Image (spheres, grey):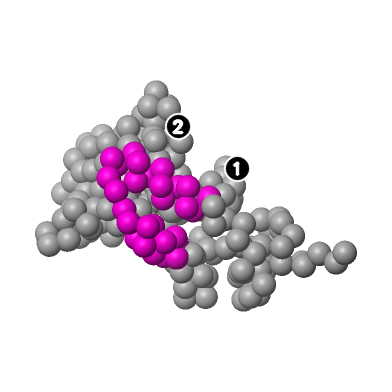
Amino acid sequence: MVMDPSLTPRSDDDLLYGCLNGDRCCRETFVRQFSNLVFSTIQHVVKIKNTHLSRQSVEDLHQTVFLQLFDNESRKLKQFKGNNGCSLASWIRMLTGRIVIDHLRRGMDALAPRHHVVTLELVSELNEPGPSAVEQMTIAEQWNLITSGLKQLKARDQLVIRMHCLDGQSLRTVAQVIGVSEKNIHSIKHRAIRRLKSVITDQK
């Protein structure tokens, strides 16, 4: 019996190489291998947020995740670096959580003006002793500096800062989405902010 190569599980490195080089078979295998993970993550976040999505909305979000990964010549997928032992599956789970949270928030305040929000907590922790350089910046300047620095952090650090410090999600919700205990999320958040501060300092 001859196995269909497209049905054989592939390693992360093989899949990434093929997907980033436009291999259609690899992309189909990628979607098949991570489809259940994306579905379960969507359902997990919806449950955490104590809300409900129609089956069609869940399927739309599922498609959105993979579209974002492969859109613009796989620009989003190219951001995966596997730093600090972060697996491809963990990175996809965190990306999916972020997309679902964004979708739910837009649903709750779709008619509200969209403003970038940088919490005082984040600004305070980013400031060095002495004159508060970050605090004195305009909101636009703060946003540009922080988002530029975020792109250089690993996926989990990005998700924690974006969800808690920029989107105002509770640390309890963040902990549930990334799969850690509430006891650990505080130290994870502080370490993420320290790394962001280091990146921002290097950018100046």
Residue 130 sits in quarter = top left
User: Could you say whether the residue bearing mark 1 is in a helix, strand or loop?
Assistant: helix
User: Mark 1 or 2, which is nearer the eye?
Assistant: 2
Describe residue 182's horizontal placement relative to residue 128 as left or right.
right
Tell me residue 178's x, y (percent).
44, 40
Residue 198 sits in quarter = top left
Q: Where 57 falls versus 170 (above or below)?
A: below
Labels in figure, total? 2
- Predominant secondary structure in magenta? helix
Disc 1 to disc 2: CB gap under 8 Å: no
Which residue is located at x 23 percent, y 58 percent? 106
Earlier-in-chain disc, 1 versus 2? 1
Q: Nearer the viewer, residue 191 or 164?
A: 164
Quadrant (top left, top right, bottom left, bottom right) of the C terminus:
bottom left
Which residue is located at x 24 percent, y 53 percent? 105
Give the amino acid at mark 1: Gly
Q: Where 21 falls versus 128 (above or below)?
A: below
Describe residue 176's horizontal placement relative to residue 117 as left or right.
right
The residue labelled by disc 1 is 85
Which residue is located at x 45 percent, y 32 percent? 180
Q: Nearer the viewer, residue 28 or 172?
A: 28
Magenta run includes residue 202: no
Circle 1 Cα neighbour tier, 10 Å, few/some/many (<14 / 14–19 / ≥20): few
The residue labelled by disc 2 is 180
Q: Which residues are magenta?
A: 37-65
